[in-house]
């Protein structure tokens, strides 16, 4: 939450930042890039990836798989802000706070109003991985 001492500009900036992180609960078509696969070390998370796909296609709320930092008004997800790529936690354990447990690998996804583009499954810290952008450009140049 905000402290109450923010300027109007800071409040507007925080609002647009927060709205930009929200994925509307709208059914979307899921697309996979050519050669999309789950790396062998992450095969145990295949059911979580399938569940995310079903949720996206059904237009379900995806918030529980996002970073817990999404609740922080001041947090800026640089990967999302710079490149429009969301990351989903692949744990199968839903914590008491309503978010899936951290520590699992991530599914990187780009959204538009009617589509979800699965980019890759990888670990944390891929925020500057140029492969994310190259996969998007090679498969969906528009």
Image (cartoon, rainbow, N blue to C red):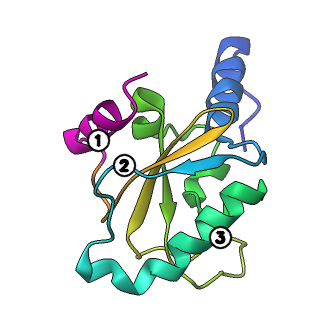
Quadrant for the N terminus in the image: top right
Q: Which of 141 and 23 is in front in this view?
A: 141
- Residue 16 location (% of width, % of height): 67, 25
Asked which secondary structure carries label 3, the reply is loop
Quadrant for the C terminus in the image: top left
Real-space Cα separation, disc 3 to disc 1, in angstroms = 28 Å
Number of numbered labels in the structure image? 3
Residue at image position (65%, 28%) is 14
Please tell me the numbered disc located at residue 45. Answer: none
Task: Kindly indicate the quadrant of the structure image that contains residue 135.
Answer: top left
Give yes or no for contact between labels 1 and 2 (Cβ–Cβ under 8 Å): yes
| Residue 12, placed above or below residue 20 | above
Of all residues, the one furthest to the front in this rendering is 34
Would you say 129 lies left or right of 93 here? left
Q: What stretch is highlighted in magenta?
A: 127-142
| Residue 55, placed above or below residue 51 | above
Going from N to C along the chain, the mark reached first, 2 or 3, is 2
Answer few, some or many: residues within 10 Å of disc 1's Cα (few below 14, many 20 plus, some between 14 and 19): some
Q: Mark 3 points at which residue?
A: 99
Is 140 part of what is drawn in magenta? Answer: yes
Q: Name the residue under label 1.
A: 135
- Residue 7 location (% of width, % of height): 69, 16
- Residue 32 location (% of width, % of height): 43, 52
Task: Kindly indicate the quadrant of the structure image that contains residue 120.
Answer: bottom left
Going from N to C along the chain, the mark reached first, 3 or 1, is 3
Q: Name the residue under label 2.
A: 33
């Amino acid at each position: 939450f905000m402290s109450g001492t923010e300027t109007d500009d800071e409040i507007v900036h925080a609002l647009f930042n927060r709205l930009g992180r929200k994925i509307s609960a709208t059914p979307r078509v899921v697309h996979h890039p050519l050669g999309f696969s789950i790396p062998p070390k992450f095969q145990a998370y295949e059911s979580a990836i399938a569940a995310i796909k079903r949720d996206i296609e059904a237009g379900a709320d995806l918030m529980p798989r996002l970073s817990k930092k999404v609740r922080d008004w001041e947090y800026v997800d640089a990967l999302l802000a710079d490149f429009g790529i969301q990351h989903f936690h692949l744990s199968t354990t839903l914590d008491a706070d309503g978010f899936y447990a951290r520590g699992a690998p991530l599914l990187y996804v780009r959204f538009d109003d009617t589509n979800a583009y699965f980019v890759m499954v990888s670990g944390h810290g891929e925020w500057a991985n140029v492969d994310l952008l190259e996969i998007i450009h090679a498969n969906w140049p528009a």
